[in-house]
Image (tube, rainbow, N blue to C red):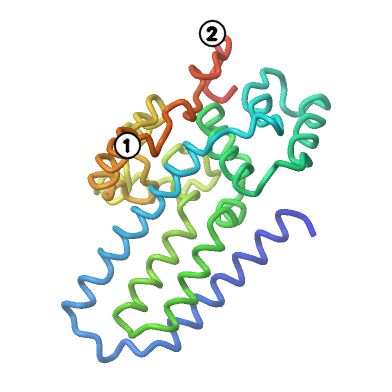
């Protein structure tokens, strides 16, 4: 099965679970104040979750033994046989873990942000569909108020990377890009300007859905650095890898 086929299957399964759960849940007895509280709470919690995972993966130590640093710092054409051989060797290394792979995808984004335009909607969803599906399943086990919160969280978590791509203006769909741009003007989705502050310095604005939760996560991140829970040496960008001067951001 190809990656594209797996992504389409995973997305279909997620939407089937989400739709079934919503239909099976009885929201009729839910008071309006609870409804008005559940949705913004879900948006905030999903945004916070995206930021927490982002911090973890951005600052997860690079597995140098396996060769991930070599992959990150590779300066040639990544479609060439020598890079593909390097990638194959690194991913097959005995010390390579799933977290290493996930962390690499986040770290390489700071070096090649526009590489996201090669991904389809389903591939973007595939990156977060597992936690999103778990949230949708968990919603089946709680009362309607909690279920609504979890359903909304599940939908948003599933779209973290797609929203992220729209902020970078990389999806090919004009409709979705225009919709996200409208939501940015309404301050429902974080702006590209605030996100690029993260790309430049890596010390703030980690949340990837609305950006609302950055007001909580930014000071928490500073505290984690102060307590040495987070090591700034693990941050990766063009400058930390000492890439050649004059190379474009999507190099």
| Image side of residue 157 versus residue 182, left or right | right
Q: Secondary structure at mark 2?
A: loop
User: Farthest left residue?
Assistant: 33
Given residues 106 and 123, the one toward you in this image is 106
What residue is disc 1 on?
Answer: 227
**Residue 108 image position (x, y, % from top left):** 57, 32
Quadrant housing residue 102: top right
Residue at image coords 25%, 64%: 40
Query: Dot 2, crowdedness within 10 Å: few (<14), some or many (≥20)?
Result: few
What residue is disc 2 on?
Answer: 245
Residue at image coords 44%, 86%: 23
Q: Look at the picture and state if 153 lies above or below 238.
A: below
**Residue 72 image position (x, y, % from top left):** 62, 27
Looking at the figure, which quarter contains the C terminus?
top right
Question: Whole-Å distance between the Cαs marked 1 and 2?
Answer: 34 Å
Quadrant housing residue 37: bottom left
């Amino acid at each position: 099965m190809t990656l594209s086929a797996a992504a389409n299957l995973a997305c279909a399964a997620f939407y089937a679970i989400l739709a079934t759960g919503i239909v099976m849940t009885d929201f009729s007895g839910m008071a309006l104040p609870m409804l008005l509280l559940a949705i913004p709470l879900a948006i905030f919690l999903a945004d916070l979750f995206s930021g927490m995972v982002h911090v973890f993966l951005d600052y997860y130590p690079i597995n140098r033994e396996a060769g991930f640093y070599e992959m990150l710092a590779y300066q040639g054409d990544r479609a060439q046989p020598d890079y593909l051989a390097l990638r194959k060797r690194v991913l097959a290394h005995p010390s390579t873990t799933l977290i290493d792979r996930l962390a690499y995808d986040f770290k390489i984004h700071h070096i090649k942000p526009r590489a996201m335009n090669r991904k389809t909607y389903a591939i973007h969803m595939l990156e977060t569909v597992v936690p999103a599906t778990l949230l949708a399943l968990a919603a089946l086990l709680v009362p309607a108020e909690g279920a609504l919160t979890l359903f909304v969280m599940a939908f948003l978590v599933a779209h973290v990377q797609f929203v992220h791509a729209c902020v970078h203006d990389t999806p090919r769909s004009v409709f979705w890009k225009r919709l996200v741009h409208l939501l940015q003007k309404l301050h429902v989705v974080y702006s590209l300007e605030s996100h690029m502050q993260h790309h430049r310095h890596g010390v703030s604005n980690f949340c990837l859905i609305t950006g609302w939760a950055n007001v909580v996560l930014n000071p928490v991140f500073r505290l984690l650095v102060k307590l040495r829970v987070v090591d700034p040496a693990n941050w990766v960008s063009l400058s930390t890898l000492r890439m050649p001067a004059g190379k474009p951001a999507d190099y």
